[in-house]
Image: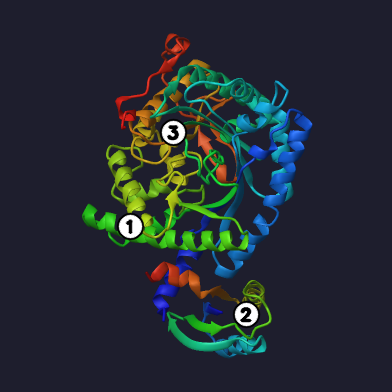
Amino acid sequence: MLNQSEIMQTIQMIDQQHLDVRTITMGISLLSCAHSDVKIACDKVYDKITRYAENLVATGEAIEKEFGIPIVNKRISVTPIALVAAAADTDNYTPFAQALDRAAKTTGVNFIGGFSALVQKGMTKADRILIDSIPEALSTTDIVCSSVNVGSTKAGIDMDAVALMGRTIKDLAQATADKGGFGCAKLVVFCNAVEDNPFMAGAFHGVGEPEKVINVGVSGPGVVYHALQSVKGQPFDVVAETIKKTAFRITRMGQLVAQEASRRLDTPFGIVDLSLAPTPAVGDSVARILEEMGLEVCGTHGTTAALALLNDAVKKGGVMASSSVGGLSGAFIPVSEDEGMIAAAASGALTLEKLEAMTCVCSVGLDMIAVPGDTTAETLSAIIADEAAIGMVNSKTTAVRIIPAPGCKVGDTVEFGGLLGSAPVQSVRPFSAKEFIARGGRIPAPMQSLKN
Amino acid sequence: MKAIVTVIGKDRVGITAAVCSLLAQHNINILDINQTVLQEYFTMVMLVDTAACKDSIGDMADILDKAGKEQALSIRIQREDIFNAMHRI
C-alpha cells in the first residue's frame, strides 16, 4: 500500500505548490463544415463543436473532483479556419470567428483556438483573407485564439507573411487599444507549429489529426521549484535528476487524467504535453526555478544554460511517464504570465535580447511581451523573422506573441488580467529594419531540411 | 472502488470518531488507517472502499469538504489511482 508520506506529498503538491492539469483540450476536425455559403458553413461549425464538446466541461469538472486535482482550463482546438473557410464565397472570415466564439461559450470552455493559417511556403487566397480578417475577428470576439505559421525547417520562411503579420499585429493592437492591445495576446506567429498543441493561444487541430482527440497539458513549476529547494548547493547532475523525478510524477498524473477524459468522452487520447506552464500566481513561476539554481535574477548571465538544463530534464522525466508525448513539451517563458519573469523584466535584468537567446533552448519563443505602442510594423516583423530563423535552423517550434501596447512607453505596465497577467513594457532596438522587411519573398529552407 | 481519505487540521478530541462515523453513514468501509500528530497538527490518511456507497466519489468529496469546513478541518477523498500513478511505476 501507499505510505502516508507519499500521500501527503501529493496533497502538498496540490495544496501548496500549485500542481494542476493546466488544460484538457479537445481537438475537433472542421473539414466537414466547408460550404460555399458563409452562413451555412458557420452554422455547421457551431453545430459540430457544440455537439462534440457538449460534455467536455462537465467531464473535466467530474474528473477534477474525483481525483482531487485541479484542471484549470477546458479548451477546444479546431482545424485551421483558412482551410475550412476556403470554400466560402466571401472576403472576410470574421463570421467564422464569431461562430467559434458562440460555440465555445455554449460549451463553457475557456478558450477556442484555430482561427489559423499555415503559410510557411506561401499564401493561398483563403490564407490571405484569414490574415486580413484577424484584427476584426479577434477584436469582435472574446475567447477565440488565432495563430499563423510563417516558417518551417522544411519550407523556410515566408517573408511576405512575416511582413504582413507585423502589420496585422499593429492593426490588432489598435483595434483593441481600449484594452491595452489585448487582442495581440490571442495571436501567435509560429515557425514549425505543432498540430497537437493543447496550449493557447497557439492550439489548432492539424489536418493529420483524427476526427476528434483529447490532448492534455500538464503543469507544475511550483512543484519543481519546491523539489529544487531540497538540493541547494549540490551539483547539476543532482539538479537534473531531481527535476526528472518530479517531471515524471507530474506527467503520470497528466497521463491518468488524459486517459480518464478520453474514456469518458469516448474520444481518442492524443498526447500529453510536458510543458512547464507558469501562471502569475506566486509560487508558480519558471523564472523562480532558474533563480533557485543559483542565479540572482532570471535574465542574468547563466540563465540560458539553466533553462537548457531545466527544459531537457523535464522532457527526460516526462517521456517515460506518458504513452504518447507531443505538443510543445518544454518550459514556457511567457513574460506576463510568470510572476518571476515580470519582476525580472521590471528590474531590467531580463531584456528582449536575453529572452531571444533563451528561446533557442526551450519550447516556445518570445511570449507575452509588451513593447512600446510606437514600435513599427517592420520592427515587429523583424522580431518575428529572428524568432522564425531560430526555429527553422534548430528544427524546433518558435513563436512570437508580442503586444505593441497602444500609447504605452518603456517602463509602463500593461494589465491583461487572469492567467494572462501583466507585462512591463520592454524596449526594442531603435534602429530600422524597414528595407530588410520590404524585400519580401522567401528565405529558403536550410540544409537541415535535406534529411532524405 | 478504492479511495484515499485525508484529514488535516489542528488536533483535538474526537476527530477520528467524527470522520469515521461520517464515512460509516455513507456505507464507506475503512480498510486501513494511519494517523500522526505533529506539532499540534493532526494528519490522518485512510484507505477506504466505496463499493457499497450510493454517492459518487465526486458527491462524497463535496460532503466531506462541507463537514470538514464545519469542524475547521481539511477532509478530502480522492481516487487511489492518482497516488498510484504518481508514486508507483
Subunit ID for the residue under disc 1? A
**Comparing labels 1 and 2, the label whose residue is closer to the camera:** 1
Q: Are marks 2 and 3 on the same chain?
A: no
A433 vs A450, left or right, is right
Q: Residue at x 40, y 41 (%)?
A: A363
Q: Chain of mark 3?
A: A
Q: Position of residue A129 (x, y in %)?
A: 64, 22
Numbered tag placed on residue A244 in the rendering: 1
Q: CA distance from mark 2 to mark 3?
A: 54 Å
Indicate which disc residue A192 carries.
Answer: 3
Instruction: For mark 2, name the chain.
Output: B
Q: Is residue A352 left or right of residue A424?
A: left
Kind of residue at disc 1 = Lys
User: Callout 1: 10 Å neighbours few (<14), some, many (20+)?
Assistant: many
For the residues labelled 1 and 3, say whether their Cβ atoms are less than 8 Å apart: no
Which corner quadrant of the image does residue A165 belong to?
top right
Whole-angstrom CA distance, mark 1 to mark 3, is 26 Å
Residue B53: name its quadrant.
Answer: bottom right
Amino acid type of the residue tagged 3 in the rendering? Asn
| Residue under label 2 | B71
Structural crowding at the residue carrying mark 3, measured as other residues with C-alpha within 10 Å and reported as few (<14), some (14–19) or many (≥20): many
